[in-house]
Image (tube, rainbow, N blue to C red):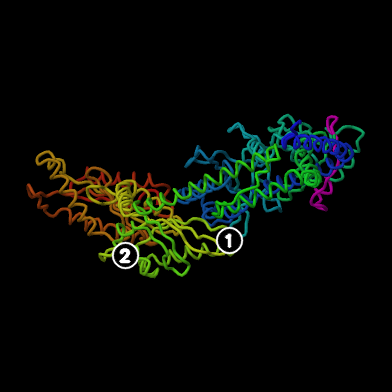
Amino acid sequence: MIKFGLRARSAAVGVSVFLLMSFMTFLFIRYFSADIARDLGSKYAQENAMRYAEKIKGTINFDVTLTQKLASSIPIGEWAVNEKNLQQKQEVFAILNDYLEVSKAGSWFIAFEKSGHYYFNDANGSHTGSEYIKTLESNNYNDSWFFHTLKSPDPYNLNIDYDEALGLTKLWLNMPIVHNGKRIGVIGVGFDYTRFIDEYIAEDKEGFTTMILNAKGVIVAHKEKRYVNYKSEVVDSTSWITLASLVDKGHNEAEFSKQLALLAEQKINATSFDLYLNGRHYIASATYLPQLKWINLSMVDLDNIFGMREMAIIGTIFIILAFLSWVFIFMVSERYLISPIRAISEVMRRIKDGDYSVRLNAEEARCDEIGELCRNINEMAERIEDSAKDAKQQYQWLADNMSDVIWIMELNGHFSYISPSVERLRGFTPKEVMNQSLDKVICQGSMDEVQKSMADAFADVAAGKIPKAMTIMIEQPHKNGSTIWTEVNARLILDDEGKPFRFIGVTRDASQRIKAEEEIRKLAFYDPLTSLANRRLLLDRLEQAIVSAKRTGSYGGLIYLDLDRFKPLNDRFGHDAGDELLIEVGRRIQECIRATDTAARFGGDEFVILVNDLGVAREEGFQYTESIAKKIQMKLSLPYELKMTTYILSASVGISLFGPYSSSTREAIIEVDKLMYEAKEARRDEYKGHFASNI
């Protein structure tokens, strides 16, 4: 008798279904792919046109908004009126350089009508603090953009210009400076035009092309640079290439020109049309950008559209055919697969629920895989039944002897089981714990965290989710009256109906881990000798203080001190005496400052004090910082009663402020360090301070 097993039967059915599906798929694609490709191509082109348009508008609009604020800025207007004011000039340069940090532009410029002076700087700070670059002249064609912007009714103008000095083509955003209702100059920013195109236009997708046109159909941006004259600013120049010049002749060139004209006149927001270029058929979609007076054009090659979307089409086809195939396979395999599998599933469910005595009908008459599977399941059930008895004994031994506490808690907060190891952890016997309510097992300070975790588990069940395991740190009372920190890992268990049943979990001692973590944190941020903040913590807090000062317009102070005559103490009495003195210095400094201030050992015998929140009046802030410095200096000059000697020393002190215009943590430290060394060179026991030059 020839055995025709389940694998052979499934293979035969699968081959038959596959051949049927392949034939149907071929017919579907043959008759409907052309229309689908065109519809998908049109939609894809429209989506990309809108996406690129929004991307470009978002970039330009952001810088337009920022430049508008600069154009109406009071400091800029006042400097334009009084251009010789160097302090105002430095203030304006600082504002414009800060602007580059948030802008996507690579340079800024400012020019004034009265003097014709043109100032410029880039992101590298190449011209920081320099005099004007050049003088603009009305009879110079290269300067015509300036006078055009002053007279233009538009709120801003854009032009593409090749910068000979930089060797780059720039997309310039020009905006008139308005002061007391008059246009007195032009301010703006420049984008690297090649980079602008690479970022917003050039995208290497097969069968997809995007470009930017002006209102006359001239190509001003294209991923293939041969189509764009990057060194010309004359839009009407014959050196520019128009889209019309590239369209294949005899394919209704007037139609797309008409559509572009409607866009430029803002009679429509977007349009789609057929386009024939270089012998290929494209579906094109165009969107008008009124801010730039540009048209964004996206094209999809119909010959490649099916290649880009074939997975979606084939997937849709096969989903439909798979459903039909499933119905057919189900009807054919009901007798050979489904009924036996249902019986196997029922037996496996009962084994899963703990009924290891259940057995399958081995179906001795069946010689295929199903019969073999039934016999294997019966043998497995017998082994599981034997193993379960051994596992129960082993589990009980582990629960009784492991250091972690295993527990089961009912929904009412009472424990129905707790392992004996709880007595080693908390001093209570399992029986005592099971007689306690939840508020007696957990300290009051941890109760909110426990109740929140339980509530989250119940919320997951209400939302139809499986409750996740939760791990929390809680404080628990010990029988001797102390408390102990523990780590609890628990989960809410559901019953057969999916309703909350009970909590199970494991509790372990976390005291040593918490202690170790605290030691690690202390070593990372505090000086091990003086217990003051170390350099790392000070710089972190100083950086936060500078950011806050810039945001709020307030000031903060820095005191940098270096101990005088400290080295002779080390040389004569050894490092133990030096360490003893440094500890006392740290204690005295800490007594002189507020709780909100930070005292740090910066290295060796150097200390830095960060004075926070001095308000917006810098003279008062400096006076307060100076008073703290004097107080510290006086304290440090008092005698030190050391184990080996009585010693007297002094400190050289530098004082500096940082405020709204401070640039960086590094510059603030360098400034106050410099002041300290000036004090040390001038005379011992003298502090020296003045306002930092970056304020």
Which element carries disc 2, helix, strand or loop? Answer: strand
> Is-magenta flag for residue 177?
no
Q: How many marks?
A: 2
Picture coordinates of residue 297, whole percent (x, y)? 77, 42
Please state, as top left, top right, bottom left or bottom right, where the N terminus lies in the image: top right
Above/below status of 357 relative to 139: below
Q: Amino acid at mark 2?
A: Pro
Q: Nearer the viewer, residue 516 or 209?
A: 516
Q: Name the one closer to the observer, 649 or 657.
A: 649
Seen from the viewer's position, the closer of residues 158 and 275 is 275
Residue 244 on image: x %, y %: 84, 36
The region drawn magenta spans 260-280
Residue of label 2 = 477
Q: How far apart in space, not on screen, are marks 2 and 1 (Cα)?
A: 35 Å
Q: Which residue is mark 1?
A: 496
Q: Position of residue 539 (x, y in %)?
A: 36, 48
CB atoms of marks 2 and 1 within 8 Å: no
Q: Nearer the viewer, mark 2 or mark 1?
A: 1
Tell me if 49 is positioned left or right of 650 in this view: right
Q: Indicate the position of residue 89 as horizontal and vertical percent values.
A: 48, 48
Judged left or right of residue 692, residue 214 is right
Q: Which mark is residue 129?
A: none
Visible residue check, residue 45: no
Q: Nearer the viewer, residue 551 or 293?
A: 551
Q: Is residue 262 magenta?
A: yes
Where disc 1 sits, the SS reads loop
* Residue depicted at 70% across the width and 47% down the height: 340
Dot 2 alpha-carbon crowd within 10 angstroms: few under 14, some 14 to 19, many 20 or more: some
Asked if one can make out residue 224 in the rendered structure from this viewpoint, the answer is yes
Which three-letter amino acid code belongs to the residue tagged 1?
A: Asp
Q: Residues within 10 Å of mark 1 (few under 14, many from 20)?
A: few
Q: Earlier in the sequence, mark 2 or mark 1?
A: 2
